[in-house]
Amino acid sequence: MRRVSKNELAGIIEKHGKWLRCEEGGERADLSGASLFQADLAGANLAGADLSWARMTGANLTGADLTGVNLAGASLTEAALRWAKLRGAALSGADLSWADLTGADLRGADLAGARMIEADLRWAQLRGANMAGVRR
């Protein structure tokens, strides 16, 4: 498990922003398998990033743009994903137990086999989401 410091994470997010804007020096964020325990990513734009198998227990992703992000197999237990944009995200096999997904946009997301025990889905948008085998 790769640990990521606050400073390193800030640099990755900055380069990812440049990548999204097609600017020089940009690079797609690859945080696959990273340890981001209780990371504060509120409002971050990580659209299209690879966060597969990341450990994000207790992370704050409130209002984050995670459109099309790969979170397959990620641990998001007790994470705050209020009003996060997860449209088209890959969340197959992810653990979202006790996560706060209030108002999250999960339209078209792949949640196949995800674990969502006691997840708060009030006002969440789930149209077109693959919920096959979701454990609640």
Image (cartoon, rainbow, N blue to C red):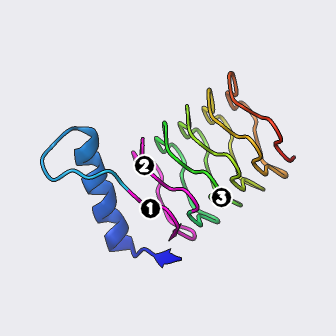
Q: Are marks 1 and 3 in contact (CB under 8 Å)?
A: no
SS for callout 1: loop
Q: Are marks 3 and 2 in contact (CB under 8 Å)?
A: no
> Amino acid type of disc 3?
Leu
SS for callout 2: loop
> Amino acid type of disc 2?
Ala
Residue hosting label 2 = 49
Which image quadrant is residue 126 in?
top right
Which image quadrant is residue 86 in?
top right
Mark 2 nearby-residue class (10 Å; few <14, some 14–19, many ≥20) = many
Mark 3 nearby-residue class (10 Å; few <14, some 14–19, many ≥20) = many
- Mark 3 or mark 2: name the one nearer the start of the chain: 2
For marks 1 and 2, give the CA distance: 8 Å
For marks 1 and 3, give the CA distance: 14 Å
79 drawn magenta: no
Which image quadrant is residue 57 in?
bottom right
Residue hosting label 3 = 76
In the picture, measured across the screen, residue 16 lies left or right of residue 135, that is: left
Q: Are marks 1 and 2 in contact (CB under 8 Å)?
A: yes
Residue hosting label 1 = 31
Name which residue lies at 54% across and 56% down: 52
Q: Which contiguous range is marked in magenta?
A: 30-53
> In the figure, 43 relative to 35: above or below?
above
Residue farthest toward the top in the current orientation of the protein = 127
50 drawn magenta: yes
Mark 1 nearby-residue class (10 Å; few <14, some 14–19, many ≥20) = many
Q: In front here: 73 or 20?
A: 73
- Mark 1 or mark 3: name the one nearer the start of the chain: 1
Q: In front here: 127 or 93?
A: 93
> In the figure, 116 relative to 106: above or below?
below
